[in-house]
Image (cartoon, rainbow, N blue to C red):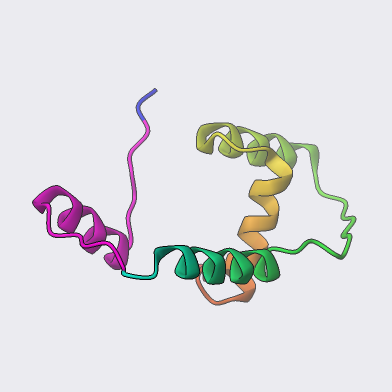
Amino acid sequence: MKKVAKYDVEELEILQAWEAGTLKPVSDMAEQAKTHRAAADATFKKDQRLNIRISSRDLKSLQARALEEGIPYQTFAASLLHKFVSGHLVSQR
């Protein structure tokens, strides 16, 4: 099964710059990495628990999609919830 890569606009710009050889390192790379690492830690801190009941059919589908993505299904579910509440994933109603 071949996985099709899906990129957003920013990711495509980065990929094109990488392929063109036009990416330039930042002058304060260590400080930038530290700042971004701290932001990521604060953003993805898991300090709450959520227990839900879903149908076995939905769970199997969720697990299959997570397997396609190569991540644990609970991580995939948390990612979907995060994308939805942050407005990056919209309902198709």
Q: Is residue 9 magenta?
A: yes
Relative to 81, 86 lies left or right = left
Q: Is residue 90 above or below residue 58?
A: below
Q: Is residue 33 above or below residue 86?
A: above
Which x, y percent locates residue 70?
A: 55, 34
Q: Nearer the viewer, residue 91 or 83?
A: 83
Q: Is residue 12 above or below residue 93?
A: above
Q: Quadrant of residue 84?
A: bottom right
The magenta span reads 3-26
Q: What is the quadrant of the N terminus in the image?
A: top left
Residue at left offset 52%, top offset 38%: 69
Relative to 77, 28 lies left or right = left
Q: Is residue 32 magenta?
A: no
Residue at left offset 49%, top offset 63%: 33
Which x, y percent locates residue 25?
A: 27, 62
Q: Nearer the viewer, residue 77 or 37?
A: 37
Relative to 48, 32 lies left or right = left
Q: What is the quadrant of the C terminus in the image?
A: bottom right
Q: Nearer the viewer, residue 14 or 83?
A: 14
